[in-house]
Structures are given as structure tokens and as C-alpha cells.
Amino acid sequence: MELSTILLFFVYAWGFGFILSWFDKSKNIYEKNIMRLGYGLAFMGFLFALFSLLKIPIDWRIFLVLAVLGPLVHVLRTGKYKDIRSGLKARMPSLNILLLLVIFGVSLNMYLSGAFSYPYLEDDDPWSHASGAKYISIEKTAYESVEDNFFLYIDARPPNYDGIMGLLLQTSEKISDVLKTFNSMFICLGLLFFYFFAKQVMGSANKALFATAVLAMLPAYFTHFIWSHTLVIALFFPALYAFNRIEKDRLWIIPAAFSIAGILLTQETQSIKFAVLIAGYFVIKTIVRKKIDWYQLAAPVAGFLLSLVWWLPMLVRYGSVRYMYKWGMQGYPLDYVSPEKYVHPSITEYWGMLGTATRQHGVYTLSDFFTITEKASMMNVSIAIGFVAMSLAVLGIIYLALKLRKTEKKREYCLFALFFFAFTYLGANGGMHWWSPFALFSFRFWLILAAAVALLAAEGAEMLKQFLKGNRMLQTGLVILLLLMVFYTSGDAKWEVNTGQWGPGGGWVNAEELQGYLALTQLPPDTKVFPFTSQRQGRAGERIIGLDKFFCRWCEEENDYSDWYDRDVENVYDFLKRNRYEYALFDSHIIEQEGVNESNELLQRYIDSGNFQAVFSNEGSVLLKVE
């Protein structure tokens, strides 16, 4: 991974975050500048949507100028260098910040070690993200043709995740490196954002640090699986953090609104969950204070209106929400799964989408929450919390319930933490119990449930510390012991899952076909490779792009040439030379469809023509060099 691309990533995020929060006078430079990364990442989603609408190229040079321009204009306009200098000036961080950075570093090392332990992308989603990011990096727009609809995760889906990856790819050679590196970065930045949000609402840096350590160890809080959820959930915490600060300064409506818009422009179903979460938080604040804070209400409203820069054009392009979902999101039916296969027999009717990774007839039992977690796990979401963390969370529920008579601010937090857990717990069981029939990809709730559990676990630990009140050394020893126990019952399993070998996903006919595609890794990045396959060319094209080579699956001529099998060898050769393809790959799908003998005869005709040379072959694939 190029160091320059990593540096540019932080320049983009921090620069845009500074633009949204130039007025922030917080004395803690680490808190102020780390949270700016969150606002900036959210703001980039708005820029991708706006640039696509206005037909401004999504070009890294334009983004760099804009990111640097904001801080520069602030300095020139005010004549004050303090705000910029405070972000660069070295100050000794507190012990809590040092420990927080250790959590960040260890987690990032874990995720990167696993992601880079094999040369391919895992499962299916990452290959599609690679294709969308490649398209944005070259075409410099997040819009595609309605008639073609090649990409699963852009148009009509929101553009922020693939947009950031595509922007970073413009200064990097390998899409696989970009996806693996920055997907892991999003997860770990989410830990930093969570810490400062937890510190804000809990009123204690120590409890926030404990909660963050627990969250980092919970298997349910992300594997290194590559998908947009890593970014969208990371953005939850800057949005809530800025939302809370509106109470003190109305200018915080700006970063709060753009952060909320960024969530809506990153992933659609998690956005709905965030909407429920922030609506519940607002209602709690209103009830406790017995008055409506109209400025806090303005932030989510403004965020929604800002997000229409993407969603309104999508609605116009596709004609209706239903058609936008069915066509723009690759034809998934609205229920997405077969109820007979997934809904628990205790339910006669449910509402929403279960998602194919929700446990079949899947009642989640206490063992999923209170066990010493197993090493085996699904790649995208680990359905596990751990005995010690969950036990602490139960104690936390009791502890917060007993504190409801405290001050107004404490009541707000207590009610929010309890609501956070109740909502995510019900969501994780959505469609699987008669008492929770509302399903919105139930298995994905575990990612958010982990954050609620971490907050409650910190309160549970605080409750236990009260029994040792007055003895700071014993309290410290207790905290260390609890964290070690959480690691034993949760963190160890998470480490094993995330540093182990994962498979390349479904759709591969056999191991030989995978080896044929992996032969492409020996070629220079962006070498043009045409897929000779009987499967939908888009899937083969995604694999070629995900292995850092190039096939223009969105180009008109390439798509018209999906009938290559019915054309003579000379015609195919002329097409490949005209479009500067250097290699062509026969995969196992064509062998499986046509049979071994017919495929061998076809392949032999290509070689006998003198225009192709076999440079790699096995029983499942052949890589031909175009002479």
C-alpha cells in the first residue's frame, strides 16, 4: 500500500472535517482532530453525490485542493494560525489517549494481518465493491447508465464507500490493497470515534476507555470482511457526538447535519437503524427536559435534506422507490429471502427483510450471548458476544436502572443506553420471535448491538468497582482482570477468526479455476484481461478487477461481445487487439457448460491460430497471451 495514498486519505478526511468544524474550540487536540476525520469521511459522501449530479469529475486533485483550501482560507481570513497549529503541534497525550491508540494499533494489525494473509478477496461482496470502485476511479462519477446497471453497490445504492475507495485508487496501483487497507481502517477509526462519543455521554474517560477495549474484543463488532457497513457504523458516533454538542453551540448543527447525511449516503439499511436510534435519543432528551430543542431536531432534518442530492435524482431516474430497489439494486425482491426457509415457525407474518446470513429458522439463544465464543464464525458477521462481556452488560442494565433518579443529564444517558440495547437486541431477533416480527437484515444488528453491549459492560464494571470503593489499587486490578476475562471469552476467538485463512466466496466451480485466476497476480497491475466464460461476464470481470487487473465490464463494445463463443477465432483476436487486451482467460464455467472435449477443441483452435499462446493451464482454466 502506497504511503502517499494513506497520507492523502487523512488529508481528505481531516481537511473536510475542519471545514465543517472550524469553530470547535475544544482544548483536547486529540479529541478535536480525530473527530474531524469522522465528519470529513461523512462529508465526502455528499461531495460524491453532488459532483456526480453536477458532472464535476471525482478526481483526487480536485478533492485535495478542496480539502486543503478550507483550512487555508480559515487561516488567511482570520489571521489565526492556532487552530491549524494545534492539529500539528506535538503534545504529550494522556495515558487514556495512549491506551486508546494502543487499542487502535492492535486492532488494525489484527484486521490487516488477516486481510493480507491471502491474495484474493473473500466471499462475494468485496469483488463487487472492487468493480464499483474501479469504475469510479476511471469514469470519475458515481452515476451509471440505467439501461446497463452493472454495479451492485452504486447507483441506486449510495456512493460514499465505493467513492472513497475509487478516489484512493486513483493514487494507488492495486484495488485489493486499497480495499483491504481502508476497510480495516474504517473499523478501527470507528473505535476511536466510539471512545469520544462514550466519553461525552458517560462523563468519564476511564469508563469510555473500558467500553472501547470491550468493543474491540467483541466478535460481533466486525470481522475484516469488506463491505460498506464498516464505514457507515463508524459514522454513527461522530454524528451522535456532534448532535449532542448542539446543546452548547448551535453551529454544531453543521457537522451533525453533514454527518447524518454521510450515513444516508453510505449504506441504506443501516441508515434506517440510525434514524430510529437518533429519533429515540431525541425523544428521550425531550421527555427528560420537558421541552423540545428545535436546533437538535433541525440537524437530522437538514441531514435528510442534504442526502436528497443523491436520493432525489435516483428516484427520478428509476421512477419509483420500488423500481429503484428492484432494478437499481440488482433485482432483489422486497422480502429478499424465502420466509419458509428463514422465518421461525412461531411467526405467521413478519415485516421487512431478513437477509441471507440470518440464521435459518434462527432463534438466537442465550448461548449466542453468554458463551465462551467459538473460533468458527461467518465471515461478514460473527454471531457472538461472550460470557463475561454479556454478564457485565446485564449488571450494567441493573446499575443504570438504579441511577434513573440521578440528575437530568444522567437520566438522559441511562435511558439512551437502555434504549440502545433494547432496540438492537430486538432488531437482532427481528423476524425470529413473535415478540419481534420487524426484520431489517436481522444479522446485521449484531454489529450495532456490540456497541450497546460495550457501553453497558463499562457500567457493569463500574458497579463492581463500587464494592472496592476507596481502594484504587484493587479497583485497577479488578479492571485489568475483567479485561483479561473478556479477552479469554471473546477477544481470543475474534483474533483467531480475523487472522485465519478465509475462502474466496461462492461461484467458483473448483479450486483449479481459482488457481487460474490467481495466475493473474503474476501480471503487472491493470493488465487488460478478457474473460472467456459462460457465466455472466460481470462476475468474471469483478474477479479480474479484484485481482488488480482490468476488464471494462461497463464498456459497450465489451458487453456486446459477450457472445464471443459464437464468433470465429480471427474475429475474437481482432476485437482483443483493437481494445488492447493482452490476455484472455478460459475458466471452468465454459468447461462445465460445454464439456471437456468441446472446450479442448475450442481452446486448440485458438492456439492453432498462432495468435494465442498458453502461459498457464490446469484442469480448470487456461490463461492465453494475445500475440
Image: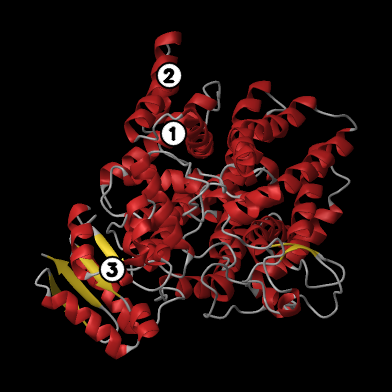
Q: Amino acid at mark 2?
A: Lys
Q: Residue at x 47, y 74 (%)?
A: 497
Write down the residue under mark 1. Answer: 14
Residue 336 visible? The answer is yes
- What whole-number distance in Å separates the C-alpha atoms at marks 2 and 3? 68 Å
Disc ID at residue 567: 3
- Disc 1 on helix, strand or loop? helix
Depth check, front residue: 620 or 210: 620
- Local secondary structure at mark 2: helix
241 vs 70: above or below: below
Residue 405 image point, x, y percent: 89, 46
Q: Is residue 555 visible?
A: no
Q: Is residue 54 above or below residue 338?
A: above
Earlier along the polypeptide chain: callout 1 or callout 2? 1
Label 2 vs label 3, nearer the camera: 3
Q: Is residue 440 left or right of residue 415?
A: left
